Image (cartoon, rainbow, N blue to C red):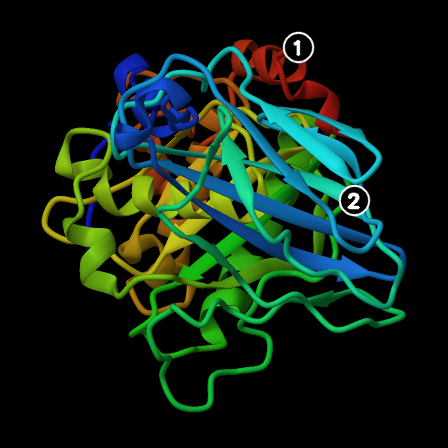
């Protein structure tokens, strides 16, 4: 059985690289020969009268220190709440500008933002074109198909550029059609494009989170709320080896989970931290020396934890204890002494015979996500 390194709490460097947004931008029009960009506009979910969209920008030109993206809606859509960008609208013209943490963009770098909007329940086409700092995105504009009208929420199809999937995946292997309630714990299983769907994974993750929910109630007298279904199954854009071998966040320990987190953030418009949810992501990918951790309102775990939740990797108490430990980090707790009897130490391996100390309970209740507990 794979033993997790007690390195689960994310270091400041890892937090900066892994739990913060990517940079973004484009070049100025005065250097048109060096200015190029690509925009991917995705309708993530759509329901009667409303929709949620994600917009990814890649700078193909010279580095910039700030960006403004503009487009025009063609069917009367309007923008409401936005995240990771300042978005305004005048008539059909929309302007999105960077926020303080994602204005700088090196050549080849990307960023993303998202928004909720309204539509006419008949047509919700992708905008015909985008400009970045006044320069048309001639590097190519790609978009996923918009979803068909429906009186109830329905998700958009996977982008056609995605790798082919295993035969007959379960119909549930898609992102949740509705946005979960705020101030809840949101759970994702990212299934790489060459990994066959297995219902044991979302079912097992739900059981692990439900046990952690029970434990928090036992220890604190309050607990967090889970959504229904507990686990959102996300079709990954890449094969397993890509998540394992594409460098991200420095140390290879983080590659699989950081690549997963970046994809989840892009697809669902998630922040790090995100005031709406605590986010738990598990990916069926790992690679040599890979692991995971928690902090800043996130838990990010690799393949052995996903296998453990599915009942394929040793006694369940080990995985219950591991989730309690990582959620402790997500709620703001640091690691504790390796043998102090708390679940924030190596004592997690003795679950359920580990507990939160009174100081840890106080830190959770008074911490940045204490208000999520009821």
Which SS class for mark 1?
A: loop
State left or right for residue 371 relative to residue 318. Answer: right
**Which residue corresponds to the image point at 31% horizontal and 13% vertical from the top-left?**
12
State which quarter of the image contains the C terminus: top right
Q: Measuring 47% from the left and 83% from the top, which residue is drawn there?
A: 169
Cα–Cα gap, marks 1 and 2: 34 Å
Q: Position of residue 325 (x, y in %)?
A: 43, 33
- Disc marking residue 366: 1
Q: Where 240 falls versus 37 (above or below)?
A: below
Q: Is residue 75 left or right of residue 261?
A: right
- Residue 138: x and y in percent read 40, 46
Vertical order, 359 against 311 (above or below)? above
Residue nearest the observer in this picture, 15 or 28: 28
Q: Secondary structure at mark 2?
A: strand
Residue identified by numbered label 2 = 117
The quadrant the N terminus occupies is bottom left
Which comes sooner in the sequence, label 1 or label 2? Answer: 2
| Image coords of residue 257 (percent x, y) | 31, 44
Of labels 1 and 2, the one closer to you? 2
Looking at the image, can residue 54 be seen? yes
User: What crowding class fits label 2: few (fewer than 14 Cα within 10 Å), some (14-19), or many (20 or more)?
Assistant: some
The residue drawn where x is 63% and y is 41% is 185
* Label 1 Cα neighbours within 10 Å, binned few <14 / some 14-19 / many ≥20: few
Q: Nearer the viewer, residue 267 or 221?
A: 267
Quarter occupied by residue 290: top left
Q: Is residue 340 visible?
A: no
In depth, the one of 196 and 34 nearer the eye is 34
The quadrant in which residue 147 appears is bottom right
Count of numbered badges drawn on the protein: 2
Identify the image quadrant of residue 27. Answer: top left
In the rendered image, residue 54, in percent from the top left (x then y), is placed at 58, 45
């Amino acid at each position: 059985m794979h033993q997790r390194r007690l390195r689960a709490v994310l270091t400041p460097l890892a937090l900066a690289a892994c739990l913060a947004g990517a940079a973004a931008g484009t070049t100025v029009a005065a250097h048109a020969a060096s200015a190029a960009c690509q925009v991917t506009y995705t309708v993530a979910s759509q329901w009667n009268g409303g929709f949620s969209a994600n917009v990814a920008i890649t700078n193909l030109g010279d580095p910039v220190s700030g960006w403004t993206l503009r487009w025009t809606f063609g069917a009367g859509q309007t923008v409401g709440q936005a995240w990771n960008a300042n978005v305004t609208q005048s008539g059909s013209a929309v302007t999105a500008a960077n926020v303080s943490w994602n204005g700088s963009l090196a050549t080849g770098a990307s960023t993303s933002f998202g928004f909720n909007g309204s539509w006419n329940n008949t047509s919700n086409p992708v905008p015909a074109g985008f400009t970045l700092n006044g320069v048309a995105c001639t590097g190519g504009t790609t978009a996923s198909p918009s979803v068909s009208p429906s009186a109830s929420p329905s998700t958009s199809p996977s982008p056609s550029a995605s790798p082919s999937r295993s035969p007959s995946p379960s119909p549930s292997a898609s992102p949740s059609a509705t946005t979960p309630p705020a101030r809840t714990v949101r759970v994702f299983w990212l299934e790489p494009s060459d990994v066959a769907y297995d219902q044991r994974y979302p079912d097992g993750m739900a059981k692990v989170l439900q046990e952690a929910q029970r434990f928090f109630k036992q220890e604190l007298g309050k607990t967090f709320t889970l959504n229904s279904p507990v686990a959102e199954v996300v079709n990954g854009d890449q094969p397993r080896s890509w998540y394992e071998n594409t460098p991200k966040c420095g140390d290879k320990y983080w590659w699989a989970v950081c690549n997963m987190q970046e994809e989840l953030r892009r697809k669902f418009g998630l922040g790090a931290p995100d005031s709406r949810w605590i986010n738990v992501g598990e990916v069926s990918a790992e690679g040599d020396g890979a692991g995971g951790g928690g902090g800043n309102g996130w838990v990010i775990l690799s393949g052995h934890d996903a296998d453990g939740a599915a009942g394929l990797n040793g006694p369940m108490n080990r995985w219950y204890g591991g989730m309690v430990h990582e959620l402790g980090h997500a709620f703001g707790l640091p690691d504790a002494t390796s043998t102090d009897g708390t679940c924030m130490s190596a004592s997690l391996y003795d679950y359920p015979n580990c507990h939160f100390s009174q100081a840890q309970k106080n830190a959770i209740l008074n911490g940045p996500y204490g208000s999520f507990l009821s």
